[in-house]
Each structure stands twice: as C-alpha cells, then as structure tokens.
Amino acid sequence: MLIRNRPSWAIPERDATPEHVFLNRRALLAGAAALGAGTLGTAPARAWGFGSGAAPAAPDAPDPSAALYPAKANPAFKISGPVTPEKVNTDYNNFYEYGTSKHVAEAAQMLKVRPWTVKFSGLVEQPREVGIDDLLKAMTLEERLYRHRCVEAWAMQVPWTGFPVKRLVDFAKPLGSAKYMVMKTFKDPKMAPGQRSFILQWPYVEGLTMAEATNDLAFMVTGAYGKPLPKVMGAPLRLAVPWKYGFKSVKSIVEIAFTDKQPETTWAALAPEEYGFWANVNPEVPHPRWSQATEEVIGTDDRRPTVIYNGYGEQVASLYAGMPKDRLFM
C-alpha cells in the first residue's frame, strides 16, 4: 500500500487558487501597467477578453461531415467508471480564446468552423493546405473513451471521436529530419475576443515529439458524444493526449508544422517555472501553487487519487526512459 505523507509546505486542494482566478489577476496587473503607460484604447473588460465586444456569429451552415457521426467505438480504448455527462462537459471548459471563465459555451458560438482549412508546413515533403471536410474523408473515424486531466486538478471522462495522430503524420509526410510536431490554433481577435487579452501569446501553440505524436494513444479529435465536436470543446479539430495535462490538448487547429527544434509552447512561454513542454501527469509532482495528489471529478462530489500518466503509464512510460534530467511532469 502506498502511503503519502503531505509535506509541511503543501496546501489542501480546496485552498488552491483556481488557475483562471490567478490569470485574471495577471491580466489586471498587465492592464494596469498598460493604462499607466497610456497604451490602451479600448475598454478594459473587452481588451482582456471578458466581454465579447462583437456581434454574435451568424447561424452555421449544415455540417458537410455530420453523417460521419456517431463513429464505431474502438473497444481497445475504454475507461472505468461513468462518462462525464455532455451537458456538464460543455459547460465547464477552458477555452481562453473566449475568456478566462470555465463557462464560455455561449461566447464560443462566435467560432466559425466552416470554411476551415488545415495547413501542413515545415519539414514536410510538400507543404499544402487541406479543407477540414477533405481531411475527414481521408481518415476513418472511431470513438475512444479517454480520461482527461486538467493541470488545475480536475478531471473528466470523455467519449472522443477522431483518428490517431499517427495517421495524420502519415498524411502530412514529414521528412526524416523532423523531431517535433507543432500545432497552432487560429488567430482572429474579431471572432475570438479573448485573443485581445494580455494573458497569452496568440495563436495558441503546442507541440509533441514525433515519438509522442505517433504513439497509439495520441488522438486527433473531430467529435464528442457521438456528434461533431462542439465549438466550446475546440471544433472542428483538436488534440487529445490523455497522459498529459489538458493544456497540451490544443483546440481549433489550423496549422501543423514539423521541425527539428523543440517549439516554444504557449503556457511554457507565459510561465516556464509552472508549465513545461512535457506536462505529463504525476501525483508526486505538485504544481507550485497546489497539490496534484488528487483530482476533482467534475459533475460529481468525488475526489480520487491522481494516477501517474493519468493511468496510461503502460502505453507511454517507455517514451521517457533515460530522460531523468528533463522536467517531464510539469
């Protein structure tokens, strides 16, 4: 039996400052500095992404790929315990392009998901840009049940629909010199008022090593709950890497680049002492401001122990063998 002794410096999870509150404070400080310098010309609430400052998007056209859902479930990827209800999931989400609140589903309706193209660039045989519906035609969709763990110490269990990232790698045809796959979201402050804020560098950027990207678990998501992906969850294309903290799972991807250099990712650029490139889940490595030993199960009154690699160690631990000097867990 594993017995954990809480160190004297650790605080209970219930006393940890929620990340969005901490970020709001950073934004306010940044805004105050800008105001002092006379550099702001818009209302602070809109500049920081807390108000839309724009009219709602027009109604969406019918989804050309809607008939692909629901996809056949892959029985190799299952979870213990119930799936988080869809309504709970879509109402509790981080999507900073639409604000720092967890409740941004209404604001995210401004996201226009058609037309949508994905650019393949960098160290590839042939750079190109492909429409999302053409990309979906080239893939076979499947449903997988995954655990999802946020760095803020909350968790969900989600039925994702999509295809393995390694199929996308095959489609992109990277050169042998490529060591990393870099994913970028869109940048359109008119469509995403949160991108007018001081909080993050835009567009949002994340990356994986080629070994991580081609691991069986790495999944490109296009749907959830048997339907096309809701906007608030990162439509029409997002990443799911369930052994890592959720901030690695970049939403609304418009570009995939291959490079031989480790990319500077968005959260690591903001706070490198708190958010590293690897971001693998580990209960023994606390965030600087809260413990990671347990996690709140959203939609329930439960807390459960956090499991290393979010329970996927058998599939991914070998990726990090011989790397003890790297900050693999934050």
Image (cartoon, grey):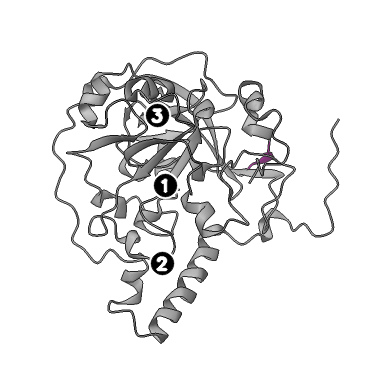
- For badge 3, the amino acid type reads Met
Q: Counting residues from the N terminus, which is met first, the one under dot 3 or under dot 2?
A: 2
Is 90 displayed left or right of 29 in the figure? left
Which residue occupies 18% across, 61% down? 55
Q: Amino acid at mark 2?
A: Phe
| Residue corresponding to mark 1 | 205
- Residue with the mark numbered 3: 220
Q: Amino acid at mark 1?
A: Val
155 vs 28, nearest the viewer? 28
Q: Residues within 10 Å of mark 3 (few under 14, many from 20)?
A: many
Distance (Cα) linking label 2 and label 1: 16 Å
Q: Quick check: 72 left or right of 299?
A: left
Q: Secondary structure at mark 1?
A: strand
Residue displayed at 83% across by 53% down: 7
Horizontal side of 11 relative to 197 (left or right) equals right
Q: Position of residue 167 (x, y in %)?
A: 38, 20
Compared with 293, 125 (above or below) is above
Residue 1 x/y as whole percent: 86, 30
Question: Which region is colored magenta?
Answer: 302-306
Instruction: Report which residue position mark 2 lands on.
Output: 198
Residue 49: image quadrant is bottom left
